[in-house]
Amino acid sequence: MMSQVSAFSRAGQPRRTDQRRVTVVSPHFDDVPLSLGQSLRDGLLSTCRVDVRVAFGRTNWTSWIHPTPGRARLVGTWRRAEETAASIVFRYRWTAAGWDEVILRADGAELLGPESILDPSADLSAEPLVDEVAQWLELVAAPDSSSAPDLLLVCAGLGGHVDHRIVARAAAGLAGTLDCPVGFYEDRPYVSHLSVEQRDEQLADLGLDLEPVDVSGAVSRSTQMRARRCYPSQMAPFFEEAMDKDRALDARERVWFPAGTAPGWL
């Protein structure tokens, strides 16, 4: 199993030591500010001490250049710099594990756009990374660690990105077994392109009876612009169109909890 090392950033102003600790698991660099940026700025997460754990920390994806495997080191360095910038703007700390993202695992040749890597029906039953990530999540949420969380948030896997679905499936299999509550946040930009029916169908794939909790007010243009400035290498039209849709619908950031498990302090 990959070790949870490689990068760390302490962001902005220090938070009070009596704050609730929330660990947010991010499939890739950028997923947390894109999915929970408003909550980090002035919603629920703005009142908490937030630690982000990036699972697929070895990356070669950028909208600027062809994502060949040989460019992974260069792109990875750039993306870590972007994540550090975001951690200062949105005020969280981060570390990254070293799993290869899907484009590296597939050699990248045929995976050049969102439409080619989003498959919510792909069978993950024989995917060994699900078990590996589950073991990692158990360590991340361990009560005897120095950063044991009061709440663990993971992506819900909405939109069908295989890396997101691996993390979501691993966490769903641990539901009720960890020493802290687990919530599933809606993945942006992907959820913004889904109908309510598609969203609910994909949530049902986790096999849990889930209840929603809004963790922010309406996502604002200023929050979106902060995310765009932090991650210039990722801002393909797919992302920008999702942001436009969120503003048009006054979208809120939302976390889904197994029924009856949402913490009372939310």
Image (cartoon, grey):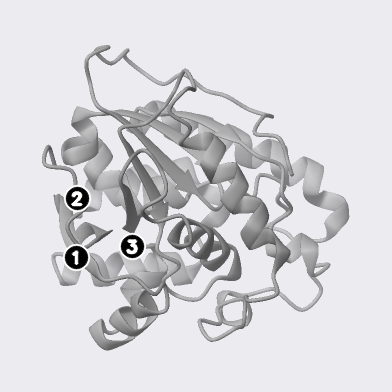
Give the residue at mark 3. Answer: 186
Would you call the spot at circle 3 few (<14 residues within 10 Å), some (14-19), or many (20 or more)?
Answer: many
x then y, percent, for residue 138: 53, 42
Under mark 1, the amino acid is Glu
Give the residue at mark 2. Answer: 262
Give the residue at mark 1. Answer: 211
Q: Quadrant of the N terminus?
A: top right
Q: Which of pointers 3 and 1 indicates the residue nearer the eye?
A: 1
From this viewpoint, is residue 247 visible? yes
**In what element is the residue under mark 1?**
strand
Q: Disc 1 or 2, which lies upstream in sequence?
A: 1
Q: Viewed as shown, does residue 236 lie left or right of 218?
A: right
**In what element is the residue under mark 3?**
loop
Q: Disc 3 or 1, which lies upstream in sequence?
A: 3
Q: Which of pointers 2 and 3 indicates the residue nearer the eye?
A: 2
Q: Viewed as shown, does residue 193 lie left or right of 125?
A: left
What whole-number distance in Å separates the C-alpha atoms at marks 1 and 2? 8 Å
Q: Quadrant of the C terminus?
A: top left
x then y, percent, for residue 39: 23, 44
Q: Quadrant of residue 257?
A: bottom left
Q: Residues at badges 1 and 2 in contact (C-beta under 8 Å)? A: yes
Would you call the spot at circle 2 few (<14 residues within 10 Å), some (14-19), or many (20 or more)?
Answer: some
Under mark 3, the amino acid is Glu
What whole-number distance in Å separates the C-alpha atoms at marks 3 and 1? 12 Å
Residue in the foreground of this view, choosing between 57 and 261 = 261
From this viewpoint, is residue 241 visible? no
Relative to 199, residue 75 above or below: above
Under mark 2, the amino acid is Ala
